[in-house]
Image (cartoon, helix red, strand yellow):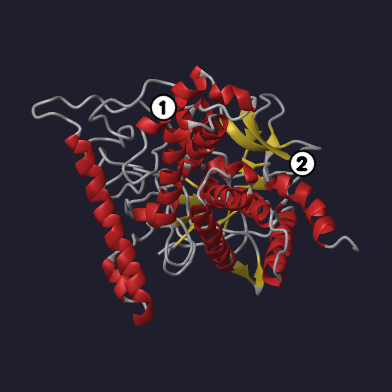
Amino acid sequence: MEMRGGHASRSGICGAAMLLALATLSGTAMVSPTTARVIGTNVPAPPLDAARISALPAAEQQAWFDYLQRSVMQMRADQASLAAELAPGAIRPPAPAPHGAGIKSMPMDREPSWYATAEARRIADTVISFQTPAGGWSKNLDRAGPPRLPGQRYSSDGGPAVRDAANFDQPDDRNWTYVGTIDNGATTGELRYLARVAAALPGSEGDRYRASFAKGIGYLLAAQYPNGGWPQVWPLQGGYHDGITFNDNGMAEVMMLLSDVAADPQFAFVSPNLRRQAGSAVERGTAVILQAQVMMDGRRTGWPQQVDPLTLAPISARNYEPRSIAAGETTDILLFLMQNQQPSPEMRAAIEDGMAWLRSKAAYDVAFTRVPGEGRKLIPQPGAGPIWSRNYDLVSGQPIFGDRDKRIHDDVNLVSEGRRNGYAWWVTTPQRALDAHAAWQARIDPAG
């Protein structure tokens, strides 16, 4: 069971972080060891399975059992399709190498005419070659590189060959991971790129790109849970990947894309029926977003990185990602909600309370920056900010920070250096929501 704790603080920072002092001689950040502590241990998220569905009220079970069966059958079909690409005795090509650019390898900011060029179409052809039979895509691959070879996997290798059940991050099958996913902008990124190419080629030359786009939207519709949320990976991969995923703005990106498909004239090439389905999916997704907002002391706050698909309770993800309220994910959810032209009273309350929570957590006069010889640390810096912790404890409301050994700290400077350097523990993105809020208020309530 996860233990939680926290300390009262100024500007939402735990007492330990505020006791940071700069060493006079070395210029490096020093942390007082007297108050910083380990406050708990991360626990794994449960998968969506038949046993858990059986515990639901009888009237709710069938829709979830149907969904689970569709997922199982789709994974079997995807794997059979890949196997059929190889001739008997042929050697499978190596898995594609992970690529840091990911969706950035698909240019999204060119002039509309560029998307009709040979270069743009070459990238689009590579994108289509990596589309799974289900209609989605894996993540973190170079879409500007060569197309997928027959029999080549849709994703890169998924971790060490030796299975470690204690590692939340390690998949059950390293040869079949994130096939497909909405993580790191995957699937939604490929679809937005294909839409640009399809729009630039209105004749028969664009048919294959429009068909791939429609298949991808069908994938998103099929992956949506009965209650309106989206898992990180579909067909389901198990573990935290089955959670409704706000992390890295996965669900927000899906909702924004489907909103555009439903209403934006640039998607007029999509069939009316598919556009209606996209709009309906957005309505169901919005309902689950409102339900998942975390309540604390009788008031709405922000949103978790991911929630359980059946209970909507916050869940953990990787070893160093504990259950929490997440400032960055809250930002993009609020930006999505503020796109609604006629927000309901419930939506307006969710937005206002979410904004109030972000304001209450803004930290000033500190910076999360590199310290010579020590990596990134939180240090005093007069005039700096605002910044926000990525994660806040569900009980105390204070910043929390995980590590690969699953320990949860109340001070980011206690996290191992490798994990401190490799994760955005303090962020500035919530300012985008705060900046957009005034314009939103003026739009929905012009009389003030």
Q: In this view, does 38 lie above or below 122?
A: below
Q: How crowded is mark 1: few (under 14 residues within 10 Å), some or many (20 or more)?
A: some
List x then y, in percent, for residue 114: 59, 22
| SS at badge 1 | helix
* Circle 1 or circle 2, nearest the eye: 1
Label 1 sits on residue = 125
| SS at badge 2 | loop
| Mark 1 vs 2, N-terminal side | 1
List x then y, in percent, for residue 133: 31, 42
Residue 49, quarter of picture: bottom left
Q: Which quarter of the image is occupied by the N terminus?
A: bottom left
Residue at x 26% of width, y 56% of height:
72
Residue at x 76% of width, y 49% of height:
436
Label 2 sits on residue = 365
- Is residue 90 found left or right of 261 in the rendered image? left
Report the front residue among 166 and 8.
Answer: 166
- Whole-Å distance between the Cαs marked 1 and 2? 49 Å
Residue 232 visible to an observer of this rendering? no
Report the front residue among 441 and 371.
Answer: 441
